[in-house]
Amino acid sequence: MWICTSAAQSRLEGIAALVGDELILQSQVQQQYAYLKQIGTPDDGGLYCEVLERMIIQKLLLVRARLDSLKVNDEQVERELDRRIQILTAQLGSPEAIAEIYGKPLPILKQDLRGEIREQLLAEEMRQKILSDIRITPQEVRDFFRSIPPDSLPLLPAEVELSQIVFWAKPSPAEREATRQRLEAIRQEIRAGKMEFAAAARAFSQDVASARQGGLLPEFTRGQMVPEFERMAFSQPIGEVSPVFESPYGFHILLVEKRVGNRAQVRHILLQPTITEADVEKARQALATLRQQILRDSISFIRAAIEYSEDPVSKAMGGRLSDEESRSFRLPLDRLEPDLYFLVDRLRPGEISEPTVFTTREGRKGARIVWLQKLYPPHRANLELDYERFAEAALEVKKRQAIEKWLRKARKNVPIEVREARCQEALAEWEKASEP
C-alpha cells in the first residue's frame, strides 16, 4: 500500500526530487519510509531510495495521465481512502498509532491524503492504459517455461479445487420473536431515558468487539455493510434510536452518530437468537436431502449451489472456493481450516461429502457439503499441471517490460532532478535519461 502526505505542503520543506513541475517532498519520502519500516519491510540500506524511485515513477505516470485528460471521481477517492485507513488500522493496531507515525490526528491525515490518493489513482489509470493491450500467447508461455532452469522450478504442495453448499442453522420462530422482544424492551428503556445507548450496548450487545466501545462501529461507506444494516444506517435520522431490524447476524438497533454523503458512523446493539442442536440438525437433514438429489442427477452441484447455498461468496461462483488473496481456485491442502481439511482429506476427486456441521470464526453454525473437484499431488511445477500459473507469470513479465519501455521513453521528455543527497548516486540514471 502506498501512503504519503499532501504535496500541497509548504514549498519551504525540503524537496527530494522534481519531475517536470511536480514536487516530491522529503517529508513524503520519510513518512512512507517510516510506514514501511513499521510494518516490517526489510531494508538492506536501499529502501529509502526505493521509496523515492517509486514516487518518481508515479509522478511520470501522473504527468502523462493529466496530458491524456484521464479522470478519477470523488467516490473512487473516498472508497480508496477508506480502504487504506482500514488497512493502516489493522497493520498498526489503532488510530493512535497511525497518528504517531504520520505526526497528525487521523481526521487531518485523511484530509491531507485525499489529494495524494487522487494522484495515485490517476497514475494507476495511466498504468492500466499502457497495459490495456498486453496479451500473452500459448507460445510465449511455453518459451517462458523453457527459460526457467529445471532445478529452479519450485516444489508445489498438494492443492485442491473445492466447491461447497452451505445451509445455516436457523432459530425457531418462537426464539426469533423472543429475541426481537428482548431487544425491543432495551430500545424502550433507552428511548425513555432510563439507560444510555452506549451503556446498554456494553451490558447487552452480543457483538463483543463493538460492545466494549459502547456499540460504536468504525466509520463505513455504502457497500461495506449487509443491505439491511446499510439501509437503516443511511435512512435513520441522526441521534434517534432505530426500530428493531433483522440481518443475517441477528436483531439490531442502531443510533447514527454522524453521516456525511456516503459515509456514516453508528452505534449498534446486537442480540442473536439461540441456535439449538435441533436447529443445526434440521439444516443438516435438509442438506442431506439436497445431496441425494445431486447424486441422483436431479440437479447439478453447481446449479444447486447457485439456487440454494446460503454462503453468498461461494454461491456467486457456483459454490467454488477461492483463495482470499490470490483469488485462485487452487487451494493448498495444508492451509485449509482444520475442519475443512479433515473433511476433504477423506474424499477422492469427484466425490461429494456427507453433510457436516461446522461453526464459523464468528460463531455462526451451519452444515455444508463439499465437492472435491480436483486434487493436485505434491509435484515439481510443470507446464501440464500448472499452465495457468506460468501464463500469469509470463504475463506479469511482459507487463513489466512494457512499463519499463514506456518509462524509458517518458523520462526522455520530462526533466527529472534528484535533490535528495543520499539518493543522487543511486538514482543518477533517472537524471541522465531526462537530459537533452
Image (cartoon, helix red, strand yellow):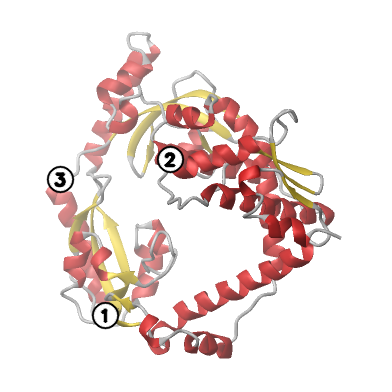
Please name the amino acid that badge 1 sits on: Pro
Residue at 43% in and 40% down: 38
Q: Position of residue 72 (x, y in %)?
A: 72, 48
Q: Residue at x 59, y 26 (%)?
A: 108
| Secondary structure found at label 3 | loop
In what element is the residue under mark 1? Answer: loop
Closest to the observer: 61 or 117?
Answer: 61
Residue type beneath disc 2: Gln
Residue 149's image quarter?
A: bottom left
Residue that sits furthest to the left in the current view: 277
For disc 3, the marked residue is: 276
For residue 357, say whether it is visible. Answer: yes
Task: Please tell me whether mark 2 or mark 1 is closer to you in this view.
Answer: 2
Q: Residues within 10 Å of mark 2 (few under 14, many from 20)?
A: few
- The local secondary structure at tag 2 comes to helix
Q: Is residue 247 above or below residue 100?
A: below
Q: Earlier in the sequence, mark 3 or mark 2?
A: 2
User: Which of the numbered marks, if any, corresponds to residue 378?
Assistant: 1
Q: Is residue 288 left or right of residue 141?
A: left
Residue 333 percent location from the top left of the image = 26, 70
Q: Is residue 436 above or below residue 144?
A: above
Label 3 packing within 10 angstroms: few (<14), some (14-19), many (20+): some
Q: Does residue 385 appear to the left or right of 287 in the view shown?
A: right
Q: Position of residue 370 (x, y in %)?
A: 26, 70
In the picture of the structure, the residue carrying the numbered disc 2 is: 38
Gap between marks 3 and 1 measured at Cα: 41 Å
